[in-house]
Amino acid sequence: MNHTDRETGAYWRANLRLVGLLLVVWAAVSFGAGVVFVDVLNRFTLPGTTFPLGFWFAQQGSIYVFVALIFVYVVRMNALDRRFGVDEGSDDAGDPQGPGAGR
């Protein structure tokens, strides 16, 4: 499949927008909940336990969110790849530079 420079640029802009958004969520949860807002969150406990919520986010919660973000990234990138015709089954599969690279 032949892709134009415009399609290639749109693909990478969408890709970088997704990565940027996920990095902001990851930073907000790991740094924000685990460091900046820890005192506020420590006023609450994790339901069913005695662990302060801020402590839990610093120790476990940010890891869970990070793993969830990986799954979100996979699902969203697969959809993005299909939208631009560079998914696993397309002619550009395996092209390391994305749609229209080198054309």
Image (cartoon, grey):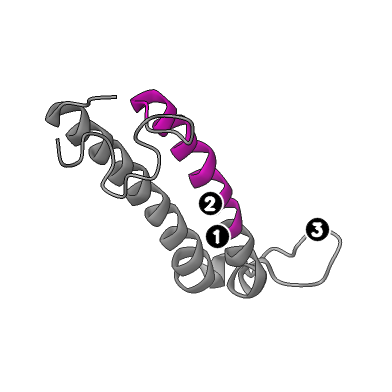
Residue 57 lies, in percent from the top left, at 61, 67
Asked if the magenta segment contains residue 87, the reply would be no
Q: 22 or 36, which is in the foreground?
A: 22
Question: Are there few (<14), some (14-19), or many (20+) residues within 10 Å of tag 2?
Answer: some
In the picture, the quarter occupied by the N terminus is top left
Q: CA distance from mark 3 to mark 1?
A: 21 Å
**Which residue is disc 3 drawn over?**
47
Q: Residue at x 55, y 72 (%)?
A: 39
Q: 91 or 67, which is in the foreground?
A: 91
Image depth: mark 3 or mark 1 in front: 1
Q: CA distance from mark 3 to mark 2?
A: 23 Å
Residue 102 lies, in percent from the top left, at 15, 41
Which of the 4 image quarters holds residue 43? bottom right
Residue at the right extreme, as displayed:
48
The part of the chain drawn in magenta is 67-85
Question: Are there few (<14), some (14-19), or many (20+) residues within 10 Å of tag 1?
Answer: some
**Which residue is disc 1 drawn over?**
66
Kindly indicate whether the residue at mark 1 contacts the one at mark 3 (C-beta within 8 angstroms): no
